[in-house]
Image (tube, rainbow, N blue to C red):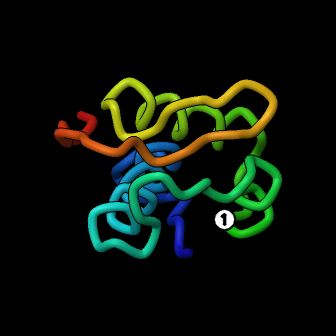
Amino acid sequence: MRIDPDGLRAPYLQLADALRARIESGEIPPGRKVPSQMELEQESGLSRNTVKKALDVLKNEGLLITAPGRGLFVTERHETKPAE
């Protein structure tokens, strides 16, 4: 996953965009658990706070849902509203 820290778009939004694309393409299908925050940190090279902000964006869009004690999962049905 390529995140450009010097890009015009904030890194957390770049990560949210990349995860959204994986969800919309079916790479991470509805009902599937998304990679853990730690895995995303390692994969993207971003800090914990930045990864959390990206995941919060996708939760606010209705793409992800938290299952307490189990992690984050792609929702079964969703409408995407890209972050600004």
Instruction: Mark 1: give few (<14), some (14-19) or many (20+) Cα within 10 Å.
Output: some
* Residue 28 in picture, x, y percent from top left: 46, 66
* Residue type at the position of mark 1: Ser
Residue 52 against residue 68 in the figure, above or below: below
**Image quarter of the N terminus:** bottom right
Left or right for 33, reference 48:
left
Query: Residue at coordinates 34% horizontally, 45% vertically from top-left?
Result: 76
Q: Residue at x 40, y 55 (%)?
A: 30
Q: Quadrant of the C terminus?
A: top left
- Front-lying residue, 4 or 54: 54
The residue shown at (60%, 55%) is: 34
Number of callouts in the render?
1
Picture quarter containing residue 35? bottom right
Left or right for 59, reference 62: right
> Who is closer to the viewer here, 74 or 37?
74
Q: Position of residue 77 (x, y in %)?
A: 26, 42
Frontmost residue, 80 versus 82: 80
State which quadrant residue 43 falls in: bottom right
Query: Residue 40 appears at what percent x and percent y?
Result: 70, 58
**Is 6 on the left-hand or right-hand side of 43?**
left
| Mark 1 element type | helix
Please indicate whether residue 6 sits to the left or right of residue 76 in the image. Answer: right
Question: Residue drawn 34% across and 52% down?
Answer: 8
Give x and y (percent) for residue 36: 74, 52
Observer-nearest residue: 70 or 9?
A: 70
Q: Disc 1 marks which residue? A: 44
